[in-house]
Structure formats: structure tokens, C-alpha cells
Image (spheres, helix red, strand yellow):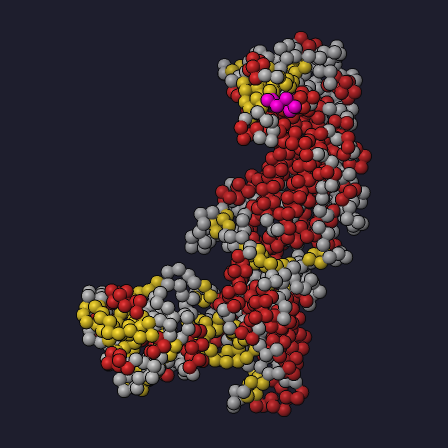
Amino acid sequence: MMAASRSLGRVPSINTARFLTTNSRASIAGAGAGARPAAFTVHHRPASASGGALHLPRTHRTASAGHRRVLATAAAADGQPQGASGSGKKVKPKKEPSVYGHTVLLPKTDFEMRANSVAKEPMIQQYWADNKVYETIAERDAEMFTLHDGPPYANGDLHIGHALNKILKDFINRYEMLKGKKVRFVPGWDCHGLPIELKVLQSMEADKRLELTPIKLRKKARAFALKAVEAQREQFKRYGIWADWEDPYLTLLPEYEGAQMEVFGQMFLNGHIYRGKKPVHWSPSSMTALAEAELEYPPGHVSQSVYVAFPLDPEAPLPAAFPAEHASAVQNASLAIWTTTPWTMPANAAVAVNDKLRYSFAKVTGVAANKAGVEAEGGAPPTSAAAAANDPASMVGRTLIIGEDLVGAVGALWGLELHTLCTVTGAELEGLIYTHPMYGPERKSPVVVGGDYITTESGTGLVHTAPGHGQEDYITGLKFGLPLLSPVDDAGDFTAEAGPGLAGKNVLGDGNVACIEGLRACGALILQEAYPHKYPYDWRTKEPTIFRATEQWFASVEGFRDEALAELEKIKFIPASGSKRMTPMVAGRNDWCISRQRAWGVPIPCFYDKETKVVLMDEATITHVTEIVRSKGTDAWWEMELVDLLPDQYKHRADSLIKGTDTMDVWFDSGSSWAGVVKARGLAYPANLYLEGSDQHRGWFQSSLLTGVAATGKAPYKTILTHGFVLDEKGYKMSKSLGNVVDPRLIIEGGKNQKTDPAFGADTLRLWVASTDYTSDVLIGMNILKQTSDNYRKLRGTLRFLMGNIGDFDPAANAVPYEELPAFDRYALYRTAAMVKEMEVAYETYAYSTAVSTLQSFTTFLSNVYLDVSKDRLYIESPSSAERRACQTVVAGVVERLLSCIAPVTPHMAEEAWMALPYAKEAGSVFLSGWAPAPSQWTTGIDESEIQFWTGVLAIRGEVNKSLEAARNDKLIGASLQAKAVVYAADADFAAQLESRKAELKQAFIVSEVVVVHTQEELMAVCVTTAGLEGEAAEGVCAGGVTVGVARAAGTKCVRCWGYTTDAGADDRHPELCARCTPIVIAADPELRAPAKGAEAAAVV
């Protein structure tokens, strides 16, 4: 009923061996020098008949606290005299070894208490590799499960976030393996892009950088990436991650680059790729366009915001919709706008209003209060001119057009007294013409109607519109045919188009200050003030970015957005909130800028006419370049002559063409992995699962969705699972400057000082991952790791104790049929079946913290209840007795289920224990043995009334323990076996049931006698302490409640089992033994005789 019932069919034979260590019988207390060996010495069988043993290092063993109670010599009789030391201090005398010690069946196993993870875990990993355990599973003929790996950057060492991510993936894969599926996990690395390019450049002297050609840079970047991949791979393997480590996917491999170019080509042929000039996130520090996922928004950014007056053109005719009765208000009126980017003023092309809002013509009638100057952008203190400009007196007499709802607020902010002359709608303002204050009458622009993005929540209700520097501005510009001005170069400096006073100045520094000063000089600056807000930074260089219109390649998301949203509705998100986060991102996306101005990447395979700049790119050119890349890699784009990159039909045009220099966004690289890995390697497609951090809703999850839908019309995954970020145990983000970075290698291997930095091992790290609610941010630190380590040791200790008690058990020969098991054993199997089911549900739903809680609850039941109750049978009964074999049958069944349950989380411990099982196994690895389900009989073989009975008994047991502890504190008893338990149940039927099962209760309560009384008075008359269940606590146990108490047990203490009985001394050879122990000892050692002094010292109570 054990191992044989678990077979998943024939599995490959793998060489295994038990540890080459055994417990010394000398460790059994009481087995003195003259003690004879027991007649039932256990002989272990090897787990496999073949060689190839795995020799794990032996570590020192000590008995656990639970063992020491039985290991200790039987207690001497009451009143034993105390000894004294040479100094005169009283000390307890050494107890003489018991002559019966060797007849007690103490736990014995080769599964050691000390994990010794630093030494053992690598050896177990080598065992897996030598015996190709993962490969066997990856190649089995079964249903395929694919968790597709999102590629980390091949840049630097791994951090704790990497560990969280890959370990979660390994939990999932290992569980699916145990369930019999074919699982192949292909790990990947993102090898292109700016992070690696920057690392290469930073490692070189300035003069050497100047000598770099694109191909030289690419060679260096490739070498850097491959070195990082090798280092990270070894670190991942140490976590116990199973994967195709010898055949990972790298985005720099020719076959991957070829697949990526095919995806690009299909999107192009589907009409989703185009080239245009649009505002994009631009990093002046990196001099390249950036995707949204390449931005970060650090706290503490402060911009210099300005309120500016754009004067209406007095010569321009009023629009037809403008109310004639308010024509006089237009005289000397200005449009009041607010912006946090003064440097975009040279690119202004319109002022936008919301046609549904109302706007006031507010005349400035006076000054309410002076406003102090603020520090200028770039750190320059405000000049006296700045202070004067922030004195709003210069605005007195002018009329400012402001959102009606904002007149009071901005008047107070500006320190101006405002008098409303009239109000009009935004629609009536459309068509008004104003002049640019910095450029005069030569620059006239219109008031236009923008979108719902214009509100009265901030600013003035009128929006400065620069289509070359903002997405909403760009859309408005397209609608009204506004000029696309962007007088800024790649370095973020103003070009000559911005004007002589600005050219060459940086828009994030002196250029911004110059714009503010220009507005001040022409009397257009109403107010300048510091404004803290979120602002996009380049996540690599940590420098601010800008929005800038440039010629780029785009994927038109608008062209397939509806299809992408429809596919998203089919995706299962875990947690469900992921859908609410990702769907609006896709719904609000119009374009994806996929080109980058860097050398280290996959080239966009286009050609340009030298004179006209017209693009040459079609199916023929893309196919031709793709085949070259597939065989030679993307270096060929830089190494080969242009004529050789052209298909035959275009070779005659080679002299008139140039190659494009843009490379693809790295998110396009990784977003094409469904094609380059999942489909190319024959894995399940769409993938069953994508699992990454929650930031990937706007990163890899989204880029994979967009490329998949644009190229094939389908999402490349079925389920998206996300995890949070790792913070220190105080909840702070980790940083080197704070000194709170937690290194996974230090957790596993320990530091130089093992007292301050102990080696916890990979399984403890994995248990920490499983213990977290990873769906949100998680905490880690030394205190948390110590607590996790304690939980690991408790689990290991329970497992060791279980295995120690089946050292002489073979399920094939010794298992007791379920029908013959005692009732409490059947209840224990019922609890085991419930645990297995809960673990299955937890694994199926990726609820690993629930799995850990379930394990902890179950092992607590085992330790505190079942094993505690069963020690008497396991230690004291004869080796082959029905009672002991029944218990061993349960323990063996529990062990095998427990091993499969812990295997995904702590695979090293599970495998080590599997190897140490004392009987033959069909599979050489716990992962080849498969998931161990509980036989249906374990659930159906026990009726509800029996379950309810034992639930009630265990509740009563808790009250008995309380009463025992109280008696122990009062020095009335010592060990629980010195006591008898007295029980009163108010419900007569329940009382009768207890009366009929007193023998089982005696075992469950671990007392020497149980008495069931009919009244509480009877109980109070004999008991020294009492406790009980009443009210809600008694519900489901006994109507009316239960009262328990304890008193000293009658009889003599048996020096072997420690129970108190009235039948001791039936055999003169063993006068201190009870009637149960006497025949067991005689059978074990017929020649054994008790010393005479033992009989004389027998205590009678």
C-alpha cells in the first residue's frame, strides 16, 4: 500500500545509496558495557542493488529533546538521595544505566538532523546531473507544461529579486513534474541593449572609446554579455533551479535573432510597422529613444514651473463663435497658461482649451500680496530681476483668461486681485489668435480645442501646446495641422531654430533658465515657483529624460489594439488585479517606438536612398537579411558589404543606398521570445504561464502580447502570474548606499564570520520564498531568515523522527491492511489525506504561503499529537507486533506523502530523505516517483462520526494537558504517566462512548489510567487539578460540556515503559516490569535478569 501503489509506470533505474552512516547503539541510554545485543537488531537494505552511491558527508548527531525522554535511564525510585561534589555543592548523582535500555526500539535513520547544506546540496545537485533526472522528465512522453522564462539582463551578479523570481518558477515546474507532466524549462538572457553597451564603454579609457567602431563595440559587448551569462547561470544553479542550463536561449544567438527578425517582418507585412516623426521619450544622457518600460520615476524631483501670459493679437479678427457683446474684453487680454517645462516654450504652436469648460476674462485690479522669488532651475539663485518679476504688480491693468473655476485659486497664488469681466465657453474661445511673447508678431498661433485631458484640477484650464514635445500635444497638433517644432538635438541642446539666445544651451539646465529669463524679460512671466512632481528618468543612467520629436520606427498599436484587448480578456491574471493594471495600459497605447540609436542590438533591416532618404524595405529585403542573420548573426549587418545584404532584384541599386543604423528596442528582442524559444523549440504554445515581477505589465508581458498579436493574432501565453519586489525587513528598498542589500550567495554559503553571516543553504532560501505573500512586496533580513531557518529545522526534525521509526519496516512485507488499522491510525491517515489535498490546491493555485502553513499545521499535529501518542507503540512494543507495524504503516505512508509535498519547495531535503528511506524504491529520485496521492480509502474508510469522535478526543486531550501542567507546577506529579485522567461528559451517549474506548483514551492522553465518571462531584472528589470544555469550546464535542481532572495513578512504575500498573512483578526474573513489557524483554533477551537491587528498590504508590 506504500511505494508500490505510487508507481507512475516503469521509470529509468537510477543508482542510489543510503548514507554510509548509522546510529551507534552505544548512543542508547541504558545499554551499558555489559548489555547484550537485542535479538531484533535492525538490518538495513540498500535502496538499490547497483553501485554509484551518493556519499553525503556525515555530521555529528545528537538526540532531539523528544528522544531524550526515552533515551534517558528509567527514573530512579522516589526519595533517591542526592550526591555531593568535592566542593561540597549538592549535585544530582549519575543515574545507573538501565539493564533494559537495549530492548527499547529507539529511532534510527541515516537522515541526519543537521542539513550541512553547504556540502550536501551541491552533491545532491551533482547526483541529479549525473543521473539525468531533469532530462528524463523533460523527455518523457506525457502532456507538456511550459513556463516561459522572461530573460534577465546579462549584466552583473544576481540579486535577491532574481532569486525570488527563479525559485517561484522552480516551485511550479517541479510540482508539474511530480504530477507526471513533461516539463522543459529553457532559461534565457537579454543580451542586447544600452545597459551592456554602457558597461563596456565605462570599462574603457576615453581615448580608446574614440577608436571604437560599431563592430568593435559589438564584439566587446558580446564578450561582456557571455561572461555575465556564465556567472549568473552558476548562481541560478546553486539555488536548485532545474533548467536547460547547457542550452539556454540568448537574444544574441543567430537563431534567436533570425526568429526576431521574422516577427518584425511579419508585423511589417501586416501593416503594423511604419517610420515617422513623433515625440518620444528621449534620453539625452544615453542619446537614444526609450520605451515606457525603460523609465523610472524617482522621488524628490523638483521642476521650475511657470505661469505665462500669451497676449492676444489685437489685429486678428474675432472668431465667429465669440460673443460680440464681450468683444471689448479681448482688448489687452492674454491667455494664462501653466507649464512645468519652460524649455518647451520655443516649440509652442497653440494654446488648447476644453470646449465644455467655461473661462473667465479676469482683469487684474491690484496686488494682494508680494511673492518671493524661488531658486532657478539648475541651482542658480533668483536674481533681483527674478524677484521683481515675481512681484505681480507688472500684471496690474491686464486681462487674463483663466478657467472660471480657478479664478479664486490662481488669484490667491499669484497675489493678484482679479475682477471677472465676463465668461465664455471654451468652444467660443476657439480661433482666437495670440502672439508668442518670446518671438513677437512673427509667431502667431491659434487657440484650439483639445481633449478631456484639459481640466481645472491644476494649472489655469488652458494648456500650452507643443506637438513636438508631448503625446497629447502631438495628437492635438495632428487634428489641427499644427507645426511639429522640436528645436532640440540628440544631446538635449537647443538648435539654431530655437533662436540666437538659446542655441547650444541644454534644455534641462541653462537652456531652461534662459527660457524663464526670456519670458521674464518680455513681461510675460506671471509667476515662477518650484514644483515637486513625478518626472521620467532614464532607468540606466539615472538622468532626466525629455519628450522630443524625432524620426523613428514605430509599431502602430492602434492598428491591432482591439485584437490585443480581446486576447487579454482570455488571459488568466494572478493576482486578478493584474488585468486591471495591464488592460488600461494597452487600451491607452497608440504607438510603440521600436527603434534605438545604438550599435549593440538587432538592426532594423532597412535601406535608405542617399539623396531622397526614401526607405527601401519589403518582403524580399527582410527575408534576405533574415536568412543572413540566421546563419551569421547580426554582426553581418555591419561586416558585410551593402550589395551582399540586398536580394538579387535590388543589387543594382547598391550604390544609391545606405544601410539604416537603428537597432530594435530590447523590449522587441525579449518580446519576440515566444517565436525564438517557445515555438522554435517545440514547447507548448501558447505557453501555459509567464511569471515575472509586477513591473512587467508594462514591459515584457506587454511587448510579448503586442508582437504576438501583431504577427500571429494570438497572445503567446494563457496565464500571467506576477510577484512584488523584495525590500529589507524594515520595508525599505535595498540600496548599496543604505547597506541593506541581501545577497543570495551570502544566504546560501554564509560569510567569513559564520556567527554573523551563517550559511542557511538553498532550501532555507527557497522556504523563505514559499513563506511570503509574493503577490505584493516581500521583506527579507537576518531576523526573517533565522525564523525561516527555525521552521526548516522543525520540518527536518519531524521528517527525521518519522523516518527513524521505520528503520526496520518494509511496506511490501510489513504493511498492515487499512481495514486492520486501529481507529486512531485511520484518523491520522484521514488527516494526512486532507493535508495532501490542501497541498495540491495550494500548488495548483500558486499559493505557496498557504502550502507552507498547511505543512506547518500538519507537522505540528504529527509532532504534538500523533507521534507523541505513538511513541509508546513504536519504542516499547515488540518489533513485529501488530500494534507497532500498524503505526509504522501509517508513518511510512505519511513520509512518502510528505516527501512529495515538500519536494517542490525544499528539493534537496526531499531528495536526501528519499535516498535515506530504508526500503527498496522503484524510482531513484523523489521527482521520478511522482506525486504521492492519498488513497481514496484514507478518506472514505472513516465515517463522519469517527472523525467527530477523534476531533473531540483531541480537544479533551488539550484540557487534560492543561490539568497535567497545573499538577506538575504544583509538584503533585512529574511525568504524565504518573497520572490518571478522570473525565466527566455531560452527554450520556458521549460518556458511554468514552467509557467503551478507555484504552484508546489512555494512549491518546499519555496517562497510565483513564476513568470516566458520572458526575462532576465524583471528579472533584479525586482530582488534584481540573480543566474543561464549556460553551462554544464544547460545541461539536459534547453537549453540556466536558470536565477533566488528574490524580496520581495507582500501582507500580514499570522501569521500561514508565507506565504505572498493578500487574508488575509477574515474573521473578523481572520484578520491576509490567505484564506487557515482561514477555517482550524475555523474547528479546532470554538470558537477561534484573539486578537484585532493582527489585528491592521498587517503589509502590
What percent of the width, then of the height, locates residue 698?
Answer: 52, 64
Q: Which residues are magenta?
A: 985-991
Q: In this rendering, would 525 be left or right of 173?
A: left
Locate the C terminus by quadrant: top right
Q: Is residue 369 above or below residue 115?
A: below
Residue pictured at 58% horizontal, 21% vertical: 1044
Residue 601 position by quadrant: bottom right
Q: In this rendering, would 507 be left or right of 119?
A: left
Q: Can residue 974 be seen in the rendering of this structure?
A: no
Residue 615 position by quadrant: bottom right
Q: Can residue 288 be seen in the rendering of this structure?
A: yes
Q: Is residue 884 above or below residue 926?
A: above
Locate the N terminus by quadrant: top right
What percent of the width, then of the height, locates residue 49?
Answer: 81, 42
Pick the residue in front: 525 or 763: 525
Pick the residue in front: 530 or 420: 420
